[in-house]
Amino acid sequence: MDNNVIYKCTACGKSFTVTISNARYPSGKKRESIDFPWCGAENGSEVTSGIITTHKVVTEVGVNQ
Ligand SMILES: [Zn+2]
């Protein structure tokens, strides 16, 4: 089961989604940093047993907000 959350970059304000995929590390949790895909800024971190993947959010006209 995946969780999909929309974040806004703390550096430039653009939107991105964060997906946490479970069951990669079933034996324990660790802290994973959330790296913004547009500008590379770190937007905090989560303690999770899964893998954090970030994706750019692009509107229909191709302009990120
Ligand atoms: Zn940014």
Image: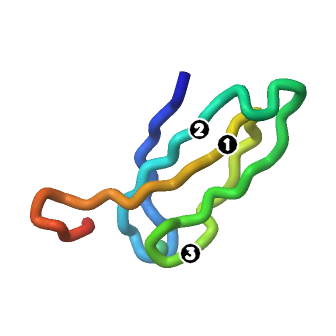
Q: Which residue occupies the extreme left position in the image?
A: 61
Mark 3 C-beta to ligand 1 under 8 Å = yes
Amino acid at dot 3: Gly
- Front-most of 63 and 51? 51
Residue in the image at 59% along x and 38% along y: 20
Amino acid at dot 2: Ile
Q: Quadrant of the N terminus?
A: top right
Give the mark, 1 or 2, whose residue is nearer the N terminus: 2
Q: How is the image coloured?
A: rainbow
Residue in the image at 53% along x and 66% along y: 36
Residue 40 — which label?
A: 3
Give the mark, 2 or 3, whose residue is nearer the N terminus: 2
The secondary structure type at the circle numbered 2 is: strand
Q: Which residue is mark 1?
A: 51
Q: Could you tell me how far apart the alpha carbons at marks 3 and 1 are, in whole angstroms?
A: 18 Å
Question: Depth-wise, is mark 3 or mark 1 nearer the camera?
Answer: 1
Residue in the image at 56% along x and 75% along y: 40
Residue 43 picture location, percent across and down: 59, 62
Q: Are marks 2 and 3 in contact (CB under 8 Å)?
A: no
Residue 20 — which label?
A: 2
Up-down: is 14 above or below 46?
A: below
Residue 2 — which label?
A: none
Residue 42 picture location, percent across and down: 63, 68
The secondary structure type at the circle numbered 1 is: strand
Residue 22 located left or right of residue 31: left
Q: Quadrant of residue 27?
A: top right
Q: For the residue carrying disc 2, how many other residues have a C-alpha within 10 Å: few (<14), some (14-19), or many (20+)?
A: some
